[in-house]
């Protein structure tokens, strides 16, 4: 009986150790749409239109908010390790700009991996008015409302 218990605890310990080691493995996740460079090179400014680009590269990851004449194909590789903060390994953006007639005007690729983080301003804009406590807010409306009069 004791040998079975020893065997069980040994197997349980080995299994638990295996799960911990496998669970802490680094993972690299690829996100976005990375078009084939040969297909990107085939796009000629002044010749191809929206539907040509979409047929060659597929739908863009996103488009410009207002004019819809800029298409963005965004690709990123992110490394995750257990419960730690994910780390950006690579991010690149393919930008295809169209003119007003829907013809490709420019094709460029930028690397945005090493962008600097922007610190937000922490000061607050003062506003006019009273600052009420919780009790003043809760009791402030007592007696302000009356029943409508019947005429």
Image: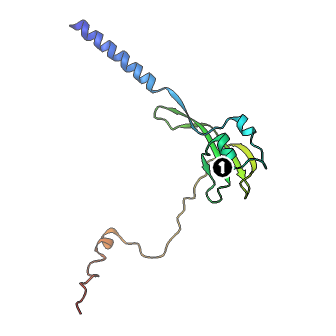
Q: Secondary structure at mark 1?
A: strand
Mark 1: few/some/many CA within 10 Å (<14, 14-19, 20+): many
Is residue 94 visible in the rendered image? The answer is no
* Residue at far right of view: 46
The colour scheme used to paint the residues is rainbow
Q: Residue at x 67, y 40 (%)?
A: 56
Q: Nearer the viewer, residue 28 or 45?
A: 45
Question: Which residue has dot 1 on it?
Answer: 71
13 w.r.t. 72: above or below? above
Q: Residue at x 57, y 58 (%)?
A: 121
Q: What x and y, as percent, mark residue 81? A: 50, 31
115 w.r.t. 25: above or below? below
Write down the quadrant of residue 143 in the picture.
bottom left
Write down the quadrant of residue 138 in the picture.
bottom left
Q: Number of numbered discs present? A: 1
Q: Residue at x 51, y 38 (%)?
A: 85
* Residue at far left of view: 1
Q: In which quadrant will I find the N terminus?
A: top left
Is residue 141 visible in the rendered image? The answer is yes
Q: Is residue 67 left or right of residue 30?
A: right
Q: Nearer the viewer, residue 66 or 52?
A: 52
* Residue at far bottom of view: 151
Q: What x and y, as percent, mark residue 135? A: 30, 70
126 w.r.t. 121: above or below? below
Q: Nearer the viewer, residue 37 or 27?
A: 37
Q: Nearer the viewer, residue 111 or 151?
A: 151
Q: In which quadrant will I find the C terminus?
A: bottom left
């Amino acid at each position: 009986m004791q040998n079975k218990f020893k065997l069980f605890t040994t197997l349980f310990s080995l299994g638990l150790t295996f799960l911990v080691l496998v669970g802490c493995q680094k993972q690299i996740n690829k996100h976005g749409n990375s078009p084939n460079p040969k297909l990107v090179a085939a796009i000629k400014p002044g010749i191809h239109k929206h539907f040509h680009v979409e047929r060659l590269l597929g739908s863009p990851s996103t488009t410009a908010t207002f004019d819809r004449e800029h298409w963005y194909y965004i690709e990123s590789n992110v490394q995750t390790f257990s419960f730690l903060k994910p780390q950006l390994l690579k991010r690149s953006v393919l930008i295809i700009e169209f003119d007003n007639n829907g013809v490709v005007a420019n094709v460029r690729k930028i690397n945005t991996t090493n962008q600097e983080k922007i610190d937000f301003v922490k000061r607050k804009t003062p506003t006019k008015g009273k600052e009420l406590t919780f009790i003043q807010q809760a009791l402030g409306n007592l007696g302000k409302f009356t029943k409508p009069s019947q005429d």
